[in-house]
Amino acid sequence: MIPRVIHYCWFGKNPLPEDAMKCIASWKKYCPDYQIIQWNEDNYDVNRNQYVSAAYKEKKWAFVSDYARIDIINEYGGIYMDTDVELIKSLDGFLNQKMFCGWEERDAYYIKRNPNYENSVNTGLGFGAEAKNPILIDILEFYNKLSFYNGDGSLNLIACPHYQTQIMKKYGLDDTKRTYQKLEFCTVYPEDYFSPKSITTGKINLTKNTVSIHHFSMSWIDPYEKKMQNMEWKLQKYVSYRLARFMVKCISIPFKIKRKIKSAQ
């Protein structure tokens, strides 16, 4: 059985933002008898392997968490959630699983914008497992051989859903469809359980199944790209998706020119 413990990571020694505090408050509301543990550089070894050490050195906190969350749950068992995940129901119904996780949202707009998209499971949405789950051990072994630097010296910014999905396919995961799948060591839930918010439009489609909402803080992406995405979401409250996207493209032109000039200097 999965322990009643919620783990989260907060590296970088910055104060928790208000949005994160609100999400953590929702965990306490719907899981009042769960222990909540924050993991940071004071209680977690950020030199665990070369990948984590390099990600920490480069101040890419989200990528430190990509490994740390798996390592922590593998060691202690429990539930992990990113700090941008809001609970709207209790997690009690998932505790009898060996492991649970969910598919990332992929709506029609996302698929149109990303024709070569992948269906991915995402442990950041919220996942839980008993300690020493074979899938977690496999993921850790993969990361122990992975470099945070590409051959040309640039950063390897491939987020964890890609790697985790590929590894879970070895255990029978079918990534051609985002459906309920009962594997030997893990139960995978459809996107409406843990990922009802569209990363493309920002709209939230709640169903009777929805347990949590991933609000996409997107801490791993360029601050400029994040700013443009947030602007697009805000505009869609007043205009259509296509018009909002066109407006953001127009607005971003002078910023892109300025960035190119700056990078060339």
Image (cartoon, helix red, strand yellow):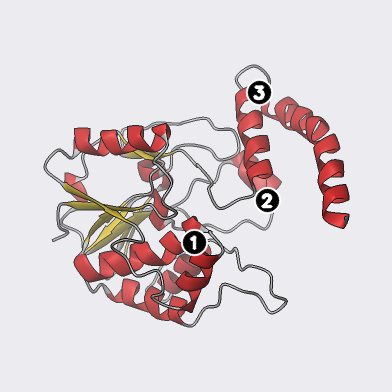
Q: Nearer the viewer, residue 27 or 14?
A: 14
For the residue pair 93 and 153, the one nearer the viewer reads as 153
Mark 3 residue crowding within 10 angstroms, few (<14) / some (14–19) / many (20+): some
Q: Name the residue beneath numbered marker 3.
A: 235
Q: How crowded is mark 2: few (under 14 residues within 10 Å), some or many (20 or more)?
A: few
Q: In this view, does 26 lie above or below 129?
A: above
Q: Give the number of the disc on residue 166.
A: none
Tell me which amino acid carries mark 2: Asn
Q: Nearer the viewer, residue 77 or 44?
A: 44
Q: Residue at x 21, y 32 (%)?
A: 29
SS at badge 1: helix
Looking at this view, name the residue that lies furthest to the top. 238
Q: Mark 1 points at which residue?
A: 63
Amino acid at the residue labelled 1: Phe
The mark that comes first in sequence, 3 or 1, is 1
Q: Give the structural element (helix, strand or loop) at label 2.
A: loop
Label 3, secondary structure: give it. Answer: helix
Q: Which amino acid does label 3 sit on?
A: Leu
Q: Name the residue under label 2.
A: 114
Q: How far apart are marks 2 and 3 (CA)?
A: 21 Å
Above or below for 60 versus 87: below
Frontmost residue, 148 versus 168: 148
Q: In this view, does 162 lie to the left or right of 89?
A: right
